Image: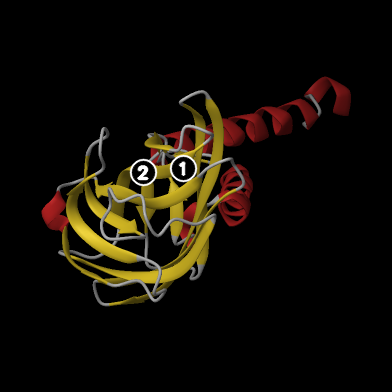
């Protein structure tokens, strides 16, 4: 009976809290993990901070729309309400840049996509979705961009993306440009070892409670 009780608790816990059905999750390292089930799902990255004395707040909502083979199509909304405009956003494939074998243009005419490019004053990114002429351009700015893009990976899910960065332009009265690192808003998903420890702990509590409830021989007599 104890084994049955523990198994029932474990099953109930997994049904309620397991991330297995999610297509996009954030791991304990803050990286984006892409799986092929449970479509569609979304994550949000915030690009908040201060550049040139101007407080900035922007966000990227990334949605996995479809998966066909190793082709992953994403929808996005990139927006800010700050005293600045947006140029684009970028990210890396955690394994290596070669993990992304192709990138298709976003559906929006205002945004384009490039691979292995430099954000000025920041870093080289494996993928950049941008307005204007290139990832470092300050023209073609806006307060919000929406669209879709498709990435082709060398292998199937799970896939890890990291180092999200957002580029601002026309910042404050200075009108300068700069980048801020993206911070995931979604709480990180516990690692498998953490889930196992949680389940073992709940099982131990269940056994202890059953022992307390069991009457002693003296009480029965």
What whole-number distance in Å separates the C-alpha atoms at marks 1 and 2? 21 Å
The residue identified by callout 1 is 170
The earlier-in-sequence mark between 1 and 2 is 2
Q: Residue visible at 38% across and 48% down?
A: 32
Q: Residue furthest left?
A: 98
Q: Is residue 171 left or right of residue 209?
A: left
Q: Nearer the viewer, residue 164 or 30?
A: 164
The residue identified by callout 2 is 164
Q: Nearer the viewer, residue 166 or 24?
A: 166
User: Which numbered marker is on residue 123?
Assistant: none
Asked if the residue under mark 2 is in contact with the one under mark 1, i.e. CB atoms within 8 Å, the reply is no
In the rendered image, residue 143, in percent from the top left (x then y), is placed at 54, 54
Q: Nearer the viewer, residue 113 or 210?
A: 113
In the rendered image, residue 27, in percent from the top left (x then y), is placed at 41, 41
Task: Estimate how packed mark 2 is, as few (under 14), some (14 to 19) or many (20 or more) residues with alpha carbons within 10 Å.
Answer: many
- Residue 135 visible in image: yes
In the rendered image, residue 60, in percent from the top left (x then y), is placed at 49, 52
Task: Estimate how packed mark 1 is, as few (under 14), some (14 to 19) or many (20 or more) residues with alpha carbons within 10 Å.
Answer: some
Q: Residue furthest top?
A: 218
In the rendered image, residue 59, in percent from the top left (x then y), is placed at 53, 48
Q: Secondary structure at mark 1?
A: strand
Q: Is residue 200 left or right of residue 165?
A: right
Q: Is residue 18 left or right of residue 16?
A: left
Point out the frontmost of discs 1 and 2. Answer: 1
Residue 154 sits in quarter: bottom left
């Amino acid at each position: 009976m104890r084994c049955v009780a523990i198994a029932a608790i474990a099953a109930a816990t997994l049904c309620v809290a397991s991330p297995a059905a999610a297509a996009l999750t954030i791991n304990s390292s803050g990286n984006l993990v892409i799986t092929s089930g449970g479509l569609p799902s979304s994550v949000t990255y915030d690009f908040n901070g201060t550049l040139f004395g101007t407080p900035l707040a922007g966000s990227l909502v990334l949605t996995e729309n479809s998966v066909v083979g190793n082709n992953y199509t994403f929808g996005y909304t990139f927006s800010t309400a700050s005293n600045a405009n947006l140029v684009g956003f970028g990210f890396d494939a955690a394994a290596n840049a070669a993990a992304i074998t192709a990138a298709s243009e976003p559906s929006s005419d205002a945004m384009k996509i490039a691979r292995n490019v430099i954000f000025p004053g920041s870093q080289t990114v494996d993928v950049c979705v941008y307005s204007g002429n290139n990832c470092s351009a300050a023209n073609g700015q806006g307060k919000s961009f929406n669209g879709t893009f498709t990435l082709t990976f060398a292998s199937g899910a799970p896939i890890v993306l990291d180092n999200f960065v957002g580029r601002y332009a026309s910042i404050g009265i200075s009108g300068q440009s700069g980048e801020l690192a993206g911070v995931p808003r979604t709480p990180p998903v516990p690692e498998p070892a953490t889930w196992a420890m949680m389940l073992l702990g709940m099982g131990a509590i269940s056994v202890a409670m059953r022992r307390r409830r069991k009457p002693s021989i003296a009480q029965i007599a």
